[in-house]
């Protein structure tokens, strides 16, 4: 670990020397670049980010008619999206081959991983009122603490500005699907707001596969002057899902109800130009009811998850080349599940299980720009947990922009951690678990050509994971072993014509278990459900400034499924093609339609849980 840090500092020093030795003659001002936040917790141009980062915008949602955040993430290199069947079923995201609970998901800066497993289930997360999604790959625990071992996905809501606008859409289609959406945003005096409401009803394809989702999200703020904004994020969702189980063991009657809500008051204050303060106090609540539950062992269950969080950050800029970011974080979490009808056939089993976790963390980061082309980031964090003590993490990252060729070089090395989830602790009845840890590094290049009409990027990454939590075959969860992931992420974005947008991403991943204590997998086995190769392509064209058509395709190769105690077995490769079109009748009215799985591919992202076949949808959109 020390060797990696020393090498990183040496490379950064050489880059600084080269930068400062360059000709100091004036260079043309660069074109405006998108600003990203998640990689450093401060504003930074995308083309100079020291982190490996991708951004998916609301424009992408509209052009491809993406209605769920999970489907937007399918185009991001380094991410694998896995859905257990059809819409409404468990939808997980794996970053760089690490587990889904190793990725921290944020909504406007608020951690929203929930449930007993500590992961983010994207099944019910729609794109209503979402402005953009920033994906940062690589360990980010120094900035974001628990669950950021593999990376961070931060979702930003829209910020109201200008006169209020309104949008209403309604659509229907295959499998008895109907969806209605209302959105509004704007600014009235000192008050800004954005709002998204939606309702989805679909029966999907199998018996007991119905899905009903009500979703609401709002961001409201008050700005008495240019230095202060006091606001709050509010979300609510209610999902009612039929769980048909696998095709090998269908359940004709099994229902799962999930209700979530969150409120997150926040204050953004800039008393002087060189000092910013950000404070978020949030409370979120999740209620689950699985009744009936035909698993034959636990029976109907009720689960409750509640969490209070405080996140404070301040950014101090004493000079133009130095930013000092520091802050603290507090989290108080209660999770429990009532299982009144659990079978006692295998010995005494608790009918109520619960967990209480408290965390306090402090972090600090220096962002140095010794010259305009070089950015260097160094940070550290200390976290204390009530159950397993203290955790230290650190991160070093740098980027160097060669303006003559419009090339960016970036690299990072960092440590990350993921604490045992409530599920790990209470179902394994083991309270001596240690956090899983990671040492990860990456190095990449981004090349912009033809006045930024073509952008090419490639990154190599490597992760060494220790303290891996697994089962020992005796209903216990233990820190059993190690794992390693490494690979390459590639991305191409091109706009050869003003009307034409092209995109392609590719990921190559090696992910293997290198420990021997976990009996669920043999040493050297490939981690399950992690594809060796994934590729995504899309093309969007605007015809006569009225008709937008978009094709997108996904190909997934070389996956394995877990076979407890024996070698993993291969599961089929798959690919699918989607087509979407929208025609603008007037500035206020448009009609749209799409066909998902155009080639009617028969596939399953999770073995035994088939995805939908070809499906067609159409609707109308009204704006005013």
Image: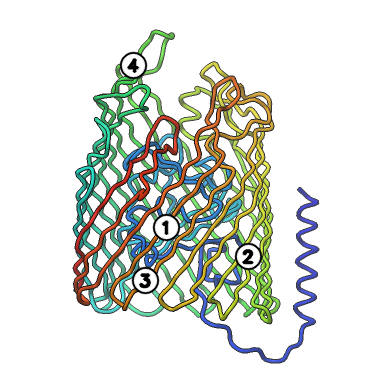
- How far apart marks 1 and 2 lie (CA) works out to 29 Å
Using the image, tell me which numbered label, if any, was put on residue 50. 2
Classify residue 482 by image quadrant.
top right
- How far apart marks 1 and 4 lie (CA) works out to 42 Å
Provide the residue designation for mark 1. Answer: 552
Q: Nearer the viewer, mark 1 or mark 3?
A: 1
Q: Nearer the viewer, mark 4 or mark 3?
A: 4
In the image, is 561 to the left or to the right of 546? right
Q: Nearer the viewer, mark 3 or mark 2?
A: 2
Among the two numbered marks 1 and 4 on one chain, the one whose residue lies closer to the N terminus: 4
Mark 1: secondary structure: strand
- How far apart marks 3 and 2 lie (CA) works out to 29 Å
Mark 2: secondary structure: loop
Disc 4 vs disc 3: Cβ atoms closer than 8 Å? no
Among the two numbered marks 1 and 3 on one chain, the one whose residue lies closer to the N terminus: 3
Q: Residues within 10 Å of mark 4 (few under 14, many from 20)?
A: few
- Answer yes or no: is residue 183 visible: yes
- Answer yes or no: is residue 149 visible: no
């Amino acid at each position: 670990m020390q060797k990696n840090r020393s090498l990183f500092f040496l490379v950064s020093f050489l880059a600084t020397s080269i930068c400062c030795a360059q000709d100091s003659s004036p260079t043309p001002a660069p074109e405006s670049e998108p600003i990203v936040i998640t990689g450093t917790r401060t504003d930074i141009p995308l083309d100079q980010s020291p982190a490996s980062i991708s951004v998916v915008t609301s424009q992408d949602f509209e052009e491809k008619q993406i209605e769920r955040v999970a489907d937007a993430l399918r185009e991001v290199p380094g991410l694998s999206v896995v859905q257990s069947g059809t819409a409404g079923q468990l939808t997980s995201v794996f970053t760089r081959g690490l587990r889904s609970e190793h990725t921290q998901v944020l909504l406007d800066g608020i951690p929203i991983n929930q449930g007993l497993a500590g992961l983010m289930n994207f099944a019910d997360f729609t794109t209503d009122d979402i402005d953009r999604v920033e994906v940062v790959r690589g360990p980010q625990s120094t900035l974001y603490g628990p669950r950021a071992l593999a990376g961070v996905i931060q979702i930003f809501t829209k910020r109201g500005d200008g006169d209020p606008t309104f949008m209403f859409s309604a659509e229907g289609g295959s499998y008895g699907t109907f969806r209605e959406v209302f959105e509004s945003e704007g600014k009235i005096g000192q008050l800004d707001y954005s709002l998204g409401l939606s309702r989805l009803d679909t029966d999907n394809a199998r018996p007991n596969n119905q899905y009903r989702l009500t979703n609401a999200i709002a961001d409201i703020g008050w700005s008495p002057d240019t230095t202060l904004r006091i606001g709050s994020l509010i979300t609510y969702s209610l999902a009612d899902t039929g769980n048909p189980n696998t095709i090998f063991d269908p359940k004709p009657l099994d229902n799962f109800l999930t209700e979530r809500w969150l409120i997150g008051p926040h204050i953004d204050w800039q008393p002087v130009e060189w000092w910013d303060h950000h404070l978020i106090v949030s409370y979120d609540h999740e209620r689950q009811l699985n009744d009936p539950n035909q698993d034959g062992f636990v029976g109907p269950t009720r689960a409750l998850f509640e969490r209070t969080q405080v996140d404070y950050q301040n950014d101090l800029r004493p000079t133009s080349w130095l930013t000092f970011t520091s802050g603290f974080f507090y989290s108080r979490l209660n999770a429990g599940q009532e299982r009144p009808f659990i079978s006692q056939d295998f010995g005494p089993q608790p009918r109520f299980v619960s967990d209480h976790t408290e965390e306090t963390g402090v972090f600090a980061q220096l962002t140095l720009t010794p010259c305009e082309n070089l950015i260097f980031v160094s940070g550290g964090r200390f976290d204390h947990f009530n159950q397993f003590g203290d955790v230290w993490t650190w991160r070093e990252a740098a980027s160097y922009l060669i303006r003559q060729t419009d090339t960016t070089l970036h690299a990072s090395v960092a440590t990350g951690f993921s604490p045992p989830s409530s599920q790990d602790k209470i179902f394994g009845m083991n309270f001596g678990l240690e956090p899983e840890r990671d040492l990860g590094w990456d190095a990449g290049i981004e090349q912009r050509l033809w006045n930024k009409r073509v952008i090419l990027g490639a990154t190599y990454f490597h992760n060494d994971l220790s303290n891996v939590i697994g089962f020992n075959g005796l209903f216990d969860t233990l820190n059993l072993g190690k794992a390693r992931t490494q690979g390459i992420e590639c991305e191409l974005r091109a706009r050869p014509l003003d009307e034409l947008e092209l995109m392609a991403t590719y990921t190559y991943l090696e992910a293997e278990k290198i420990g021997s204590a976990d009996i669920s997998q043999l040493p050297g086995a490939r981690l399950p459900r992690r594809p060796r190769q994934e590729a995504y392509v899309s093309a969007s064209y605007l015809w006569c400034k009225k008709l937008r058509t978009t094709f997108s395709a996904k190909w997934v190769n070389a996956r394995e499924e877990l076979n407890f105690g024996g070698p993993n077995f291969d599961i089929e490769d798959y690919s699918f093609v989607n087509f979407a079109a929208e025609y603008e009748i007037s500035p206020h009215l448009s009609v749209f339609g799409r066909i998902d799985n155009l080639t009617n591919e028969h596939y399953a992202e999770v073995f035994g849980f088939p995805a939908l076949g070809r499906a067609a949808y159409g609707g109308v959109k009204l704006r005013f």
